[in-house]
């Protein structure tokens, strides 16, 4: 759950079902899936189960999909991972934290991916990926001082 793959499901026409069918044919097991505008030029976001990462990207290469890999450990990627308590308000607490961090970084939330795969180290928690993108704001643009 420490990386997310984002692929454009562009066969002709864009087809999410076909992309998922191809991942299934290559026996890629997913822990989470989501995205936004997936058949309108957006990206399908998914998290392969641990140990399936190379198999997932190899399948995308094999079938000619454009994709990128985001890592939770790389803050510039805009991907945050929360382990959310399975209680009322758990998701909100995660979103509030990411939204506050985004204000400082000039980012806004693009999409949310909620997983099912639980980590033995995080019993009773649900993994949530929040992907945020940079926007042009005074916080995100370096101010140039006049000479």
Image (cartoon, rainbow, N blue to C red):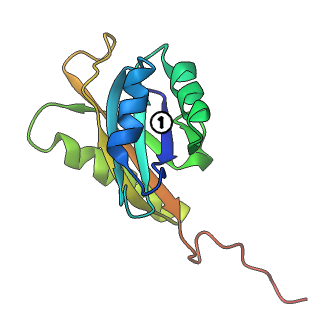
Query: In this view, which residue lies farthest toward the front?
Result: 12
Dot 1: element: strand
Query: In this view, which residue lies farthest toward the left?
Result: 88
Name the residue located 33 percent from the left edge and 25 percent from the top edge.
Answer: 31
Q: Position of residue 50 (x, y in %)?
A: 45, 16
As drawn, is 114 to the left or to the right of 131? Answer: left
Query: In this view, which residue lies farthest toward the bottom?
Result: 146
Name the residue located 50 percent from the left edge and 60 percent from the top edge.
Answer: 133
Query: In this view, which residue lies farthest toward the right?
Result: 147
Q: Say how many tags the image has.
A: 1
Name the residue located 41 percent from the left edge and 17 percent from the top edge.
Answer: 27
As drawn, is 13 to the left or to the right of 140? Answer: left
Q: Nearer the viewer, residue 60 or 71?
A: 60
Q: Position of residue 101 (x, y in %)?
A: 45, 54
Tell me where residue 40 sits by quadrant: bottom left
Q: Position of residue 59 (x, y in %)?
A: 54, 28
Name the residue located 84 percent from the left edge and 89 percent from the top edge.
Answer: 146
Q: Position of residue 103 (x, y in %)?
A: 45, 64
Label 1: how many residues lie within 10 Å, few (<14), some (14-19) or many (20+)?
Answer: many
Q: Vertically, is 4 above or below 147?
A: above
Q: Residue at label 1? A: 4
């Amino acid at each position: 759950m420490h990386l997310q793959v984002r692929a454009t499901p562009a066969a002709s026409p864009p087809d999410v079902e076909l992309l998922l069918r191809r991942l299934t044919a290559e026996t890629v097991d997913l822990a989470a899936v989501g995205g936004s505008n997936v058949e309108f030029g957006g990206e399908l976001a998914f998290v392969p189960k641990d140990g399936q990462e190379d198999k997932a990207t190899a399948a995308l290469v094999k079938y000619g999909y454009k994709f990128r890999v985001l890592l939770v450990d790389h803050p510039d990627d805009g991907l945050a991972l929360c382990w959310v308590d399975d209680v009322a308000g758990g998701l909100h607490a995660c979103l509030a934290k990411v939204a506050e961090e985004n204000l400082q970084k000039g980012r806004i939330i693009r999409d949310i991916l909620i997983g099912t795969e639980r980590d033995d180290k995080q019993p009773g928690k649900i993994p949530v990926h929040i992907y945020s993108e940079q926007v042009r704001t005074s916080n995100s643009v370096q101010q140039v001082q006049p000479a």
